[in-house]
Every structure is written in structure tokens, then in C-alpha cells.
Image: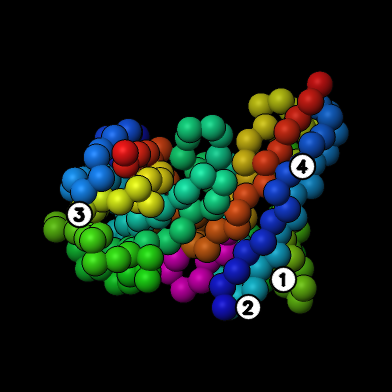
Amino acid sequence: DTGVSQDPRHKITKRGQNVTFRCDPISEHNRLYWYRQTLGQGPEFLTYFQNEAQLEKSRLLSDRFSAERPKGSFSTLEIQRTEQGDSAMYLCASSLDGTGNGYTFGSGTRLTVV
Amino acid sequence: GEDVEQSLFLSVREGDSSVINCTYTDSSSTYLYWYKQEPGAGLQLLTYIFSNMDMKQDQRLTVLLNKKDKHLSLRIADTQTGDSAIYFCAERVTDKLIFGTGTRLQVFP
């Protein structure tokens, strides 16, 4: 297992288009998190899953955003009708429930909306 | 509320020690973390400390936690040019991490 994988690494899209990102967590990790990071800021929590259940969503996650983790393994984050303000790095992380030793982050997907 | 603050910038000479400071507000934090981010990369976990500990040392890294003042620091001994990056402090609140804005560490020869 090589860690948390995210695909694609970069995405450029026109305003109004839909985009979907994928995250493959570390295989034995049951928790999966999505964060968004804009330039000069720290990552901001969007949502997280325990297995296939989505347990919490941030108020940052507008109704244009939807995340799924259908089989409790990989997850997708879809943004509909993208806006320029959606331009950011979208980071995925995974962890094992009940442990404190940190969350492992992927390299992120950089979204640019033009 | 949940808020994590860090100074924005630190510049040190190679070989000196670096100290990066962080304050947080949520007293229910269970763990506190330090992450490193290099340009264009994701976040790399450096170290973490449980909230009932005062200090943790891991090779060149020393974490100090003052729970009363909600203050966390990361000391990097013998700082090298490869340590140049952005360092994020994060507190774990319930099941998610709350990050600071990051401290950019610049190491000069």
C-alpha cells in the first residue's frame, strides 16, 4: 500500500461545468476525510466518512458539492456548476478509527476554474 | 469555538534551532499535530502529542504543550535547508482536524 492516492492531480475546467475527484485511502483505514485548501490558508474540513457512512458535513459544503464512499473504500467528491471560488487544492486523508496517530493525506487535486 | 492561530513567517540560519508557535481555543482537543507541506505537495505528518502530555521528543523535533494556555510549539534542532516549508499546527476536535494558517519557515545558509 503506497498511501492515499488522489486522481487527477490537476484539473482545469470552465465555469459551470461539473467535476469529480477520486480518493483511494490506505486500505485498512476506515475513515476518509475531504479538505479544501486555498492559497495561503490551512486546510478546511469539508466532510468525512466512517466506512460508507457520511458522518459530518461542514457548512462549507454547499449543495453543489456531493461526496460518496459507496463501498467503504474509495471516495468521490463531485462539484456541480463550478464557480471560480471553487478553485483550490482538494485534499483527501484517511485514518484508522480509534487511533490518535494522525491522518495520512494524499497529494491533493488542484482545481482551477476559468 | 474552534480556532488555531500561528505566526505567518519564520526565518532562521542553517544550523540554528527553529521554534514555531501555535495557539488553539478548543479545550476538548484530544490530540495536537504538526504537519509539514512543501510546495505543490500534500501534508506530511511530522509528529503529534496527546493532550495529557507536556512534551514529546522525536529526533530533531521537540513538541511542547501548555494546556493551561492552549499553546503548542515545535522546536526543530539543527535546522537544515531541507526543512524549508510551511508548517501547520492542527487540533483534533471530535473526529476532525482543525488547522492553523501555517507558518512558512525559511532557512538561509
Residue B22 in the image, given as x and y percentages of width and height: 71, 59
- Marks 1 and 2 on same chain: yes
Q: Residue at x 67, y 32 (%)?
A: B84
Screen quadrant of the N terminus of chain B: bottom right
Screen quadrant of the C terminus of chain B: top right
Q: Is A45 colored magenta in this rendering?
A: no
Check contact, mark 1 vs mark 2: CB within 8 A.
yes
User: Distance of mark 2 from mark 3, alpha carbons?
Assistant: 37 Å
Task: Classify 10 Å Cα crowding around label 2: few (below 14), some (14-19), many (20 and above).
Answer: some
Residue B18 in the image, given as x and y percentages of width and height: 79, 41
Q: Main secondary structure of the magenta part?
A: strand
Q: Residue type at mark 2?
A: Ser
Foreground label between 2 and 3: 3
Residue that numbered label 1 is attached to: B70
Residue B11 in the image, given as x and y percentages of width and height: 79, 37
- Marks 2 and 3 on same chain: no
Foreground label between 3 and 1: 3
User: Distance of mark 3 from mark 1, alpha carbons?
Assistant: 40 Å
| Residue lying at the far top of the rendered structure | B109
Q: In this rendering, would A45 be left or right of A42? A: left
User: Distance of mark 3 from mark 4, alpha carbons?
Assistant: 39 Å
Task: Classify 10 Å Cα crowding around label 4: few (below 14), some (14-19), many (20 and above).
Answer: some
Considering only vertical position in the picture, is B23 above or below A81?
A: below
- Marks 3 and 1 on same chain: no
Give the structural element (helix, strand or loop) at label 1.
loop
